[in-house]
Amino acid sequence: MWPIIGPISLIRYLVVWRVNRTLVRLPRCLPVEMSHVLGTLIAERLPTREAQPWRKAMTKWEGYDDGAKKNNVPVPEAAWPIESVLFVYPGKQVYGHGELILCEIKLIGNSADHGLFLEVILPAMEEASTTSDPRWHRPNSLWGRFDIQAIYAARGAQWEPVARDGKLDLRYRATPKQWADGLTFTSTSERTLDRLTWLTPFDLPSKQSAPTLPELLEALATRMGLFIPGKRRAPADVWNMLSAQDQAPLRGAMEQATEFPLRNQEIKRAPKGWPGRWTGTQTFLFIPDPLVPYLELASILHVGKQTHFGCGTFVMG
């Protein structure tokens, strides 16, 4: 196993929803509404003491109603009280009967707990699939109009079934380390990689809209501190967990990153109603092979702000 990923605790769930009505129109940014709807249902389902942090998180949505959305009010910093990512695979806005919507729910660090998913998140998702509550069950909305067709958990590059056709496998237990099983974190492309395309908007502390390679590596270091169980760690703490021998490739990658500036960028403002600040494509002279594993890891973990809503992930080409 690549030493840098050894301490990382992460469970990745691929959730497949099947639309069961003639027409469903997705909100402008589905992860934002997923967070609000599922978070509210979780807060209402949990016992009082356990619900308190969820209720506190949901108060940040007050005022962010349809009127606020139309007036382009920024998405609130309203992540769940557990470390998590809601990433919806790119698709379309309108779905018909039988069509599938795919999303990932990633549980991170201390929150990478299969029991948490089964006992807290899944019941809220089931309620959301059948709800007739007027808060969510509006004309042509997704809520109350889909079936949970399947749920899978990542084991390396493979997806193992947790539930299929409405039947949950209670014997299956996803672990916080299986996400990395067999992943090589090496480039499989026969050509030189030079392009980075953002799948979701991003918000990084960059001096320009398109981050440089060193800035991306710094964002990865910052992000990794959340994925290691225990209290949050600073970037320096993350690297110091590696032996001197394992730190050497990282230092080499950081040094190489400074030598390959941006060649071109097509970066634009994130769409209205979305979290994050920028989206688009950026091109480098080329991406050195030693950097590819770190960038692959960054794309899995998401980097920057508002990662709970799926921000900060990309593909290379």
Image: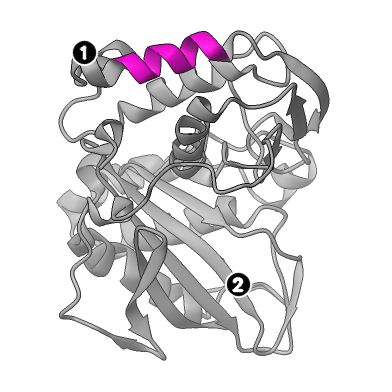
Region of the chain picked out in magenta, as a range:
248-256
> Can residue 37 be seen by looking at this rendering?
yes
Q: Quadrant of residue 80?
A: top left
Between marks 1 and 2, how big is the CA–CA gap? 45 Å
The residue beneath circle 1 is: 244
| Residue 181 among those drawn in magenta | no
Q: Is residue 123 above or below residue 224?
A: below
Query: Residue 285: percent from the left, percent from the top?
Result: 74, 21
Tell me the element at label 2.
strand
Q: Badge 2: few (under 14), some or many (20 or more) residues near its Cα, within 10 Å?
A: some
Q: Residue at x 62, y 73 (%)?
A: 142
The residue beneath circle 2 is: 101
Query: Residue 125: percent from the left, percent from the top?
Result: 41, 71
Query: Residue 242: percent from the left, percent from the top?
Result: 21, 21
Seen from the viewer's position, the closer of residues 312 and 308 is 312
Sequence order check, earlier mark of 1 and 2? 2
Q: Residue at x 83, y 23 (%)?
A: 264
Q: Nearer the viewer, mark 1 or mark 2?
A: 1
Tell me the element at label 1.
helix
Q: Amino acid at mark 1?
A: Ala
Q: Residue at x 61, y 60 (%)?
A: 89
